[in-house]
Image (cartoon, grey):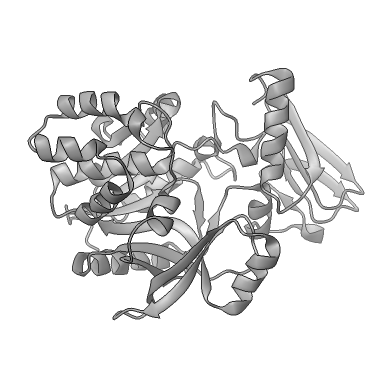
Amino acid sequence: MEKTDQKNYCVILAGGRGQRLWPVSREQHPKQFLDLFGTGRTLLQSTLDRFKKLLPIENILVCTCAGYHQLVKEQLPEVSEQNIIVEPIHRNTAPSVAWASMRILHRNPNANIIVSPSDQLVLNETSFAHSMDVGIGYVSENHVLLAMGVKPTRPEPGYGYIQLGDLSCKPDVYKVKSFTEKPERDFARMFMESGEFYWNTGIFISSAYHLLDTFEHVFPSVLRNLRYDNPNYTHEEEMKFVAENYPRYPNLSLDYAILEQSDNNVFVMKCDFGWADLGTWHAIYEVMHKVTDDNVVMDSEVILEDCKNNIIKLPKGKLGVFNGLEGYIVAEEDGVLLICKKSDNSSMVKKYVNEVRIKYGDEFV
């Protein structure tokens, strides 16, 4: 993929609340805006860095919600205001990607689009670039939606699983046979052992035309009216139309809209670029470098004695001394300390968030 190719675009999703990484990820400052690992770059900035190597900066759009608009502008000053898609009302990822796709198609009828979350870990940038290049080439020649899949390394119940169907005309690209979001651990183990299932990375590639056409089959004819009734609409007309009509969209995730609701033109490509979704404490523990006795210490000052299998994240300027702790999450941020058993049940932390909100209000959420 040539960086100078003006028909290739990327849409970065940066509107999530990140509740499963509470209390470090907070509603006013969620995980995509955090430098979790002390690298000097937030997850969102790292995602932009990754795609700036592949695409012109003017072809990278960011989807977010009104509450995070200012954070996006502060962290990504090189992204123009017209490349920031700000939802007028929160409606999950599929509607915002539909809107971004319409804006891109309006700019270039021959555009291809890579859709990517903003909170992922990619260890092999070279392999990632190759996968994006192959994927762009495939959707340029075939009117399909292409998901990026990676081989499971553990029975992770917090991820989505794509079942491989028939092999396409291209090696490593398969028809999607089925999709299962966040299965129970026993099913996740069966999926992994079968060899037929790959993790869904949440990265999708398609032509803008085909992507928007797919959304038109899933959603009410909100954007279709603007697209067909006024094809030469201005930016101001687009913004006015979206503000008036966006609330009609259902609250629908991109994964569900594409993998569960669309027609048979959905394929998955086997990839191997050292991927992890940084959505839960358990997932971060699984992919992070372990220090003595399988502890994960995230950019924190600690003294550990007789401690095993823990993940610890403390604020700057805080020191933690631990003795005899095994299998725990210890996370502190902005007046909240979480100490709980490390579990692969990603809904557990969200349960605590809801309980805190009910008992203490929004201050600690």
Relative height, residue 246 to residue 265 (above, below): above
Q: What residue lies at 68% left-to-right and 32% top-to-bottom? A: 353
In which quadrant of the rendered image does the C terminus lie?
Answer: top right
| Residue 154 in view (yes/no) | no
Compared to 2, does 333 lie above or below?
above
Pick the residue in front: 166 or 20: 166
Image height check: is 167 above or below 186? Answer: below
Mark yes or no: residue 60 visible. Answer: yes
Residue 142: x percent and y percent?
Answer: 22, 68
Q: Position of residue 102 (x, y in %)?
A: 22, 42
Relative vertical location of residue 347 with respect to residue 181 in this rendering, above or below: above
Q: Residue furthest left?
A: 232
At x 40%, y 37%, the residue is: 250
Q: Quadrant of the N terminus?
A: bottom left
Q: Residue at x 56, y 38 (%)?
A: 18
* 309 left or right, relative to 80: right
